Structures are given as C-alpha cells and as structure tokens.
Image (cartoon, grey):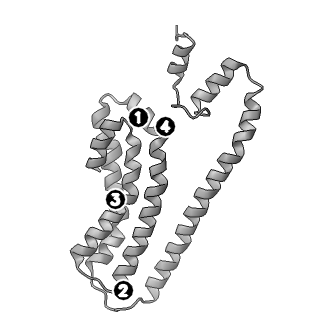
Amino acid sequence: MLILFVFSRFTNKNTVVDIGWGIGFILVSLFSLFAGGFFDWKHIIMNILVLIWGIRLAIHLFSRLFHQEDFRYEHMKKEAKNEFISSLLKVFLLQGLFMLILATPIIIVNSNSSTYFWLDVFDYIGILIWIIGFSFEFVADSQLENVLDALKPQIEQLLVLLSPKEKFVIQRRFNLDNKQRATLEEIGQHFEVTRE
C-alpha cells in the first residue's frame, strides 16, 4: 500500500488504492503459501481461487483509474487539514489493514499443514461458497454496467429540456460529459459567480 501511496502522489489520485485490493490479496496469498511451504492439492486449490478472485478484482478496479477521482476521496482531500497525512492514514494504511484482516483466512490455511492430502467436506463447502460469491460479483458488475448504459439515452433526453447553462451545470457536476467532475465552486468560477 505504501508503494501505491507514492504512486498516488504522482497521479494526484487516491483511487490508485483500489488496485491494491486485488493485487494485495494475491501477494498476501502467494507470500503466505511460500512461507508456509505446504504445496498439497488443498493449499494449491485454495490459493488458485484467491488468485482468480484477486485478478478479476484488480482488472475491474483498474478501469476506475482512468476515470475521475472517487467522490469520497475528493471530499476527503478538500476537508483534510493535511491532505498528505490524511491520504496516507485514512486511505492507504487503513485499507492495507482491512486487507490483512480479510486475508487472515488464507494466511491461516497457508500456515497450517493439511491433515488430509485431498479435499474434505469443509473444503468443498468453502469452494461452493466461493463459486456463489464470485458469480454474484460478476453478475452484479455486469448488471451495473448495463443499467448505466441503459440510462444514458434517457438522461440525454432529459437534458434536452434544460437551458444550456442548466445542462452545463448538471453535466459537469455529475460527470455526464466524460470530463473531470467539477465542484460547485469550479462551476461557479466558470460562470463568474461567487458566494457573495
């Protein structure tokens, strides 16, 4: 996460932390597998499942890097007294801690030798839960993209009803024109309007 934090300083986007989720789980899984030194089928299958999930997550979240900064991170930057420390502690290190907590099961599996060379009933239950969870994630991501694509024509129809100024405000504020999402202050500056 610290490497991603340094990278975020160059890109000026905290969104890069999202990439660390998928890649981080892969790295923790592989490190704990090799540190444990148990390479039976049970350990290999469990780690392959983590690898598949981590790769899918990393690819999905990587696409966000080229879009606007996440609104939560934007808000955090504006509200922070010291944006550098706030980003480091509240975004990168905190998410690194959460990642380690969530990766604890695979760390435990990799650090213990298996009493059975092959999979037992609990392993099959775990694999079934993984398949269900992975399927739900995949379907949910696809549905979200489909809904957003389906809404675009409807939004365009509604924007036609607005004046050019209103349309500009709505498009820039909610990033409907695929440009950087603008704050209300930035939109006000565009129209030379101040709070006073």
Read off the residue under disc 1. Answer: 76
Q: Label 1, label 2: how many angstroms apart (C-alpha)? A: 45 Å
Say whether disc 3 or disc 2 marks the residue closer to the N-terminus. 3
Q: Label 3, label 2: how many angstroms apart (C-alpha)? A: 23 Å
Q: Label 2, label 4: how many angstroms apart (C-alpha)? A: 43 Å
Mark number displayed over residue 41: 2
Q: Label 4, label 1: how many angstroms apart (C-alpha)? A: 15 Å
Res. 135 image quadrant: bottom right
Q: Is residue 32 left or right of residue 80?
A: left
Res. 152 image quadrant: top right
Read off the residue under disc 3. Answer: 24
Say whether disc 4 or disc 3 marks the residue closer to the N-terminus. 3
Q: Is residue 51 left or right of residue 163?
A: left
Mark number displayed over residue 110: none
Is disc 1 in contact with disc 3, using a CB cutoff of under 8 Å?
Answer: no
Q: Amino acid at mark 3?
A: Gly
Residue 29 percent coordinates (x, y): 32, 69
Read off the residue under disc 4. Answer: 68
The relative height of residue 167 versus residue 37 in the rendered view (above or below) is: above
Q: Label 4, label 3: how many angstroms apart (C-alpha)? A: 23 Å
Say whether disc 1 or disc 2 marks the residue closer to the N-terminus. 2
Residue 54 percent coordinates (x, y): 42, 63
Disc 1, SS = helix
Disc 3, SS = helix
Q: Amino acid at mark 4?
A: Gln
Q: Amino acid at mark 2?
A: Trp
